């Protein structure tokens, strides 16, 4: 529980530390970690036990549940599978993203990939932001492609953003962000594609309609079948598979390749590697691959 303390002047503050952390025994941790690996593909080795304990504390409090064993009983019940699984996803996933994250990817996209792909293309460009979190990546892609279209005489494109977390997807659809997040966006793009709150004290911005209209979102668990049929021209899946074991990574990238059109491009995170994987890809730049 949070503890309120008073200093010598009589002013109070809320301490950030928590007390009374509920202990999780090894049997329960094994059950949860195996389920998380099977259902979500996320590695949960014994070294993550303390982290999982701490992250589940809020769920135990919100549900008025006194132990991890009782939580498991609820989670694995029919109602728990329907109502609680989405909350467990938020507990075990890490959602770190920014606008124009790894900016060299967007320079390469604009200067090399788009000219190569759009020359003689008969259909609209199709992009997938896989593991899009709260939407910064697909909206960055949309701004970059809108700029390319504006400067080059037009471009028809669509962007699909997917994530396993319904909470993150709600934020993405809302497209409202604190001003503190927009630093990486070049000033001219801020003026063109962002809307500021009429109440300037709120210090919020919203992605404007020109960039929003090209993006749609849906929930997707990578451990399930990809339920869309279109071949994609560009896939961004960056800093997502680092949470999976090597076998799961290779299986996932193979499935990405089956959705990627020949000549299409895959962008991965700089902390990730395809080394040693048997995939129909050739490297075009660090962490950028072309489907062959």
Image (cartoon, grey):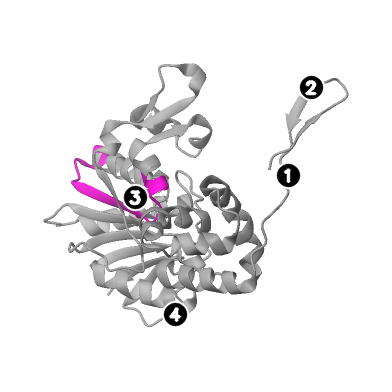
| Disc number placed over residue 144 in the picture, else none | none
Q: Which residue is mark 1?
A: 17
Tell me the number on the disc at residue 11: 2
Is residue 196 positioned above or below 185 on the image? above
Could you tell me if residue 99 is visible in this image? yes
Q: To which residue does mark 3 refer? A: 110
Which quadrant is home to the N terminus? top right
Q: Residue furthest left?
A: 122
Quote the CA–CA distance across marks 4 and 1: 38 Å
- Give the label, 2 or 4, closer to the camera: 2
For the residues carrying marks 2 and 3, which lies nearer the camera in this image? 2
Q: Residue furthest right?
A: 8
Q: Are marks 2 and 4 in contact (CB under 8 Å)?
A: no
Pointer 1 or 3: first along the chain:
1
Please tell me which of labels 4 and 3 falls first in the chain: 3
> Which residues lie in the magenta part?
150-169
């Amino acid at each position: 529980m949070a503890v309120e303390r008073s200093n010598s002047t009589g002013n109070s503050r809320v301490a950030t530390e928590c007390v009374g952390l509920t202990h999780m025994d090894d049997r329960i941790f094994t059950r949860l970690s195996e389920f998380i690996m099977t259902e979500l593909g996320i590695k949960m080795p014994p070294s993550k036990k303390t982290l999982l304990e701490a992250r589940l504390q809020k769920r135990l409090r919100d549900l008025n549940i006194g132990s991890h064993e009782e939580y498991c009983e609820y989670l694995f019940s029919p109602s728990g599978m329907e109502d609680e699984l989405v909350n467990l996803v938020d507990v075990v996933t890490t959602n770190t993203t920014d606008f124009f994250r790894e900016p060299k990817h967007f320079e390469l996209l604009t200067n090399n990939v788009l000219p190569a792909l759009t020359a003689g293309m008969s259909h609209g460009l199709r992009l997938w932001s896989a593991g899009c979190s709260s939407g910064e990546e697909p909206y960055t892609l949309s701004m970059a492609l809108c700029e390319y279209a504006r400067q080059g005489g037009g471009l028809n494109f669509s962007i699909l953003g997917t994530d396993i977390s319904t909470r993150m997807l709600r934020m993405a659809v809302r497209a409202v962000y604190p001003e503190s997040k927009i630093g990486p966006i070049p000033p001219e793009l801020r003026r063109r594609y962002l809307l500021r709150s009429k109440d300037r004290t709120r210090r919020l911005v919203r992605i404007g309609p020109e960039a929003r209209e090209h993006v749609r979102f849906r929930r997707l668990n990578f451990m399930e079948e990809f339920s869309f049929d279109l071949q994609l021209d560009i896939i961004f899946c960056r800093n997502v598979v680092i949470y999976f074991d090597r076998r799961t990574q290779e299986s996932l990238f193979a499935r990405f390749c089956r959705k990627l059109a020949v000549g299409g491009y895959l962008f991965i995170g700089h902390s990730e590697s395809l080394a040693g994987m048997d995939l129909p890809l050739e490297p075009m730049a660090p962490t950028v691959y072309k489907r062959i």
